[in-house]
Image (cartoon, rainbow, N blue to C red):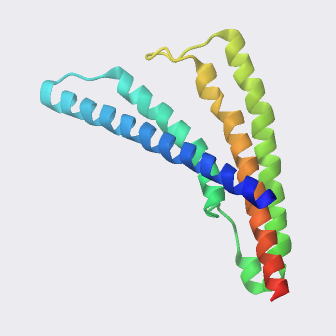
Amino acid sequence: MLGKIFERMDKILSLFEDWTLFISVMVALIALFMNVVLRYGFNYTLAWSEELVREVIIFTTFIGCSVAIKNRSMIKIDALVQLVPSLKVPLNYISNMATLIFASMMLYFGWQMAAMQAATHQKTIIMQIPLVYLFAILPLMGAMMIIRTIQVMYQDEMERRAARNK
């Protein structure tokens, strides 16, 4: 039952991650390409394209945190695990707990920062995008990281149980 829930959540999150990353990177790439063509071909530059690219880099970095957890490609120092393989399970647990704590902090403090931006009605300089939209990625990323970390921990536990039953 729990496995089915995680499987469904994985499909939904993967769809969201894949398409938002694809669309945002393509929009930034097209805007940057247009800016280069205009700059060198017509001696004219688009000021908004650089701001758009900067916002896309921020967005993709935060969404990429969730993807990194799903793909198990978070940065880890595994020298101790290679020296003492029996420590793999406890060190993975500690690593997952640290990720959960970080993600919880991002959720909590990101929500507060987004609320502050909503209260002050600040906008980006050129494109006039409300900053609350940009800061809203922080609690979203925190929630997605929490879900992904719990999924990874569940998968690890199922693999350990399957290995014990063999």
Q: Relative to 24, is 131 above or below? A: above
Q: Relative to 67, is 78 above or below? A: below
Question: Foreground residue, 16 or 2?
Answer: 2
Left or right of 131 in this view: 115: right
Question: Foreground residue, 133 or 8?
Answer: 8
- For image coordinates 13% across by 30% down, the residue present is 41
On the image, the x and y values in percent for residue 110 come to 73, 31
Farthest bottom residue? Answer: 166
Q: State the image quarter where residue 61 is shown.
A: top right
Q: Quadrant of the N terminus?
A: bottom right
> Can residue 84 be seen at all in this image of the molecule?
no
For the image shown, how many numbered marks are present on the structure?
Answer: 0
Farthest front residue? Answer: 1
On the image, the x and y values in percent for residue 60 come to 52, 42
On the image, the x and y values in percent for residue 112 come to 78, 25
- For image coordinates 75% across by 67% down, the residue present is 155
Left or right of 147 in this view: 40: left
> Can residue 82 be seen at all in this image of the molecule?
yes
Q: Relative to 12, is 149 above or below? A: below
Question: Foreground residue, 49 or 142?
Answer: 142
Q: Quadrant of the C terminus?
A: bottom right
Q: State the image quarter where residue 59 is shown.
A: top right
- For image coordinates 64% across by 27% down, the residue present is 135
- For image coordinates 84% across by 85% down, the residue present is 165
On the image, the x and y values in percent for residue 48 come to 38, 22
Left or right of 105 in this view: 21: left
